Amino acid sequence: MRDLIPIETIEQRIYLLRGQKVMLSMDLARLYGVETRVLNQAVKRNAKRFPGDFMFMLTPREAGLLVSQNVIPHRKHLGGHLPYAFTEHGAVMLASVLNSPIAVEASIQVVRAFVRLRRMVSASRTLARRLDGLEREVKSHGTHIQSIFSLIGRLMDSPAKPRRQIGFTPPEKPG
């Protein structure tokens, strides 16, 4: 099976909305080789297959944010409708509803892109934890080094006490 669309291209179309990684209906329609209108009709005909954790409609505010971030060129680009946002599970369900060979192949690529992003996030969390540990360790070393310098400074600043001589001292010769 050949890759229809490179995973990297799909990853660029995965957005974080409401704390979930999602793809917009217009991007999925393009990937699945159908018009957005056809995709939306399929969703409406099969509404029971798309619970809230599979798909949700964007709010006007969210659509505005996507426009301001240049995800969507302009609100007019949406055709007067707010787009749907599909989670990984929703994108797979959508492919089964559309049931075209292109949609099935593209959905495999979409799942691979979501999985790859999940791995990258996991790796970055592990790296972040390690960096936090290293930062705490460096801070504690810094505190210890500062204490050492402080002690050295105090030793250097304290006046030397006159030393009492130990041992035989010959008497001074008179004059």
Image (cartoon, grey):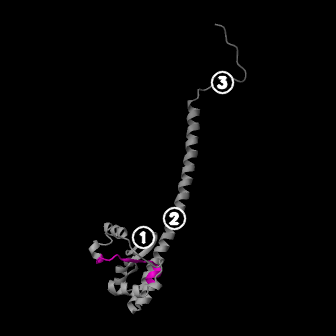
Q: How many marks?
A: 3
* Residue at 29 percent of width and 76 percent of height: 80
Q: Earlier in the sequence, mark 2 or mark 3?
A: 2
Query: Which range is magenta?
Result: 78-92
Q: Amino acid at mark 2?
A: Leu
Q: Is residue 139 above or below residue 31?
A: above
Q: Which quarter of the figure has residue 94?
A: bottom left
Whole-percent x, y for residue 85 in the image: 40, 76
Is the C-beta separation of discs 2 and 3 under 8 Å?
A: no
Eye-nearest disc, 2 or 3: 2
- 16 vs 77, left or right, is right
Front disc: 1 or 2? 1
Q: Residues within 10 Å of mark 2 (few under 14, many from 20)?
A: few
Pointers 1 and 2 in contact (CB under 8 A)?
no
Task: Report whether residue 104 is seen.
Answer: no
Please say whether residue 157 is visible from this viewpoint: yes
What is the three-letter code of the residue carrying label 1? Leu
> What residue do we see at 36% from left, 67% from top?
61
Query: Between 122 and 42, which is closer to the camera in this rendering?
Result: 42
The amino acid type, in three-letter code, at marker 3 is: Arg
Quadrant containing the N terminus in the rendered view: bottom left
Residue that numbered label 2 is attached to:
127
CA gap between label 1 and label 2 equals 24 Å
Q: Is residue 84 magenta?
A: yes
Q: Position of residue 73 (x, y in %)?
A: 28, 72
Identify the mark nearer the N-term, 1 or 2.
Answer: 1
* Residue located beneath label 3 in the image: 163
| Residue highlighted by disc 1 | 17
Q: How much space separates mark 2 and mark 3, taking CA atoms?
A: 57 Å
